[in-house]
Amino acid sequence: MSDHKTLRHSQTLALRSLCQALVPANEFYANRLKATGLDLSSMTLEDFSQRMPLTTRIQWTQDQLDHPPYGTNLTYALDRYVRFCRTSGSTGHPMIWLDTRETWDAMLDNWIRVFHAAGVTHPTRVFFAFSFGPFLGFWTAYEAATKAGHLCIPGGGLSSEDRLRLLMDTQAEVLCCTPTYAIRLAHVAEREGIDLARTSVKYIVVAGEPGGSIPATRDHISEHWHGARVFDHHGMTEVGPVTYECPVQPGVLHVMEDAYYPEVIDDELILTTLKRPGSPLLRYQTGDIVSAERRSPCACGTHELALLGGILGRKDDMTVIRGINIFPSAIEEIVRGTGKIDEYKVEIFTKNDLAAMKVIIESSGGETVRRNLEKHFQRALFLRIPVELAPANSLPRYEMKAKRWVRLTDSVGTQS
């Protein structure tokens, strides 16, 4: 395992090589790099951090809108690119990302590290419980498992019931999905009389939401799946798979620093992609809120940056209620820790010119669980958050990223 000094030397060389490849080939970054006045052949990581401006989502989004469909952040001729992915558009217009064979292969190697950290090191059977759309994470996970020699079982185009039956028929040992969908599958299994104790699932690798690093959510999933170990990781279409869960400390994510140069500014994770030169991002503001720590080394032996508690939230998801900053992960932790809650929704609205929120739950525990959840919110957040009971199966169910937070335009309840 490389020590931190060796790691930084490797990052420096990779960064120099990347930046030199971008001038003058990459129209999006060439002038930005020239304006820094940096000597790209000898710059240090510190020089780069001090003089290279941050890249925002707004900048590359606007670039693609101004230069459709792919924008100007392309380092090579278009015929070099062989993979097309697109963002979900959950925070704006869907945007496109292209990869060459080499950059795609590098991301598959990152995903193989995710599997290895989870203990999936020998050929086995991996079930992918999602529909395959244009999002990068689905394809990189599937193809990485194939590259690593696993039997890959796609669950696209199937109902939840059919996925469960296929999962059992194939005796898959690894399940890949969002935390929300792992819970959803467990509820469907209970409804259909499918005994999850009869599955062969030993590992559940989750992504797409912060729940995989939230202890209450992890425990909730593991309990439903009869002791299967839950492993988290995170990434984005525009940067690729970024972290893997520490093998010995659940809830801690390590940044794969051979592929990324990470910085943390005002608790926000800033990333430079070192192995994606075809469509790179330099000092990209991810919007992810983290609590970072440099361990020398970590108990698992790595010197890579540790994100304690995983991704704590996103800057654009934070809500301020009576002066208290609230992230969705905090609500998730309390809801799952309360128990007997099948699904929930959070509504944000304005009351008496102030931001307010309420939580709507489905629970077999009825009024007792409702009151307990209100007490838990008061105890943990020092806020009175009203909780309402909803009829069974009335709230939406999700296969991909859950959209449980609804912002209303006014106190009457007009949804934005």
Image: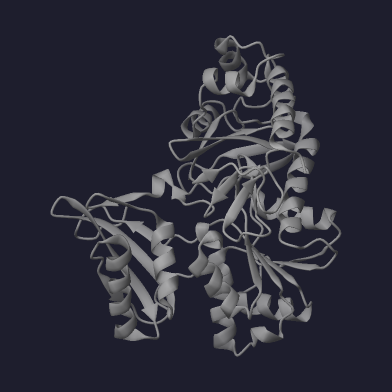
Q: Is residue 267 above or below residue 213?
A: above
Residue 378's x, y, as percent? 27, 67
Q: Is residue 219 above or below residue 330?
A: below
The reply, left or right, for residue 395 in relation to residue 167 is left
Residue 356's x, y, as percent? 23, 57
Q: Can the viewer see residue 398?
A: no
Q: Toward the viewer: 37 or 277?
A: 37
Q: Toward the viewer: 282 or 337?
A: 337
The reply, left or right, for residue 268 in relation to residue 115 is left
Q: Residue at x 60, y 57 (%)?
A: 207
Q: Residue at x 49, y 46 (%)?
A: 291
Q: Is residue 233 above or below residue 389?
A: above
Q: Toward the viewer: 224 or 145?
A: 224
Q: Residue at x 74, y 79 (%)?
A: 200
Residue 288's x, y, as percent? 49, 44
Structure colour scheme: one colour
Q: Is residue 30 above or below residue 77?
A: above
Name the outermost residue toward the bottom.
193
Q: Determine the image quadrant of residue 146.
A: bottom right
Residue 114's x, y, as percent? 71, 54
Q: Toward the viewer: 257 or 293?
A: 293
Q: Determine the image quadrant of residue 121.
A: bottom right
Name the outermost residue toward the left.
352
Q: How many marks?
A: 0
For the N terminus, the quadrant is top right
Q: Determine the image quadrant of residue 72.
A: top right
Q: Can the viewer see residue 362?
A: yes
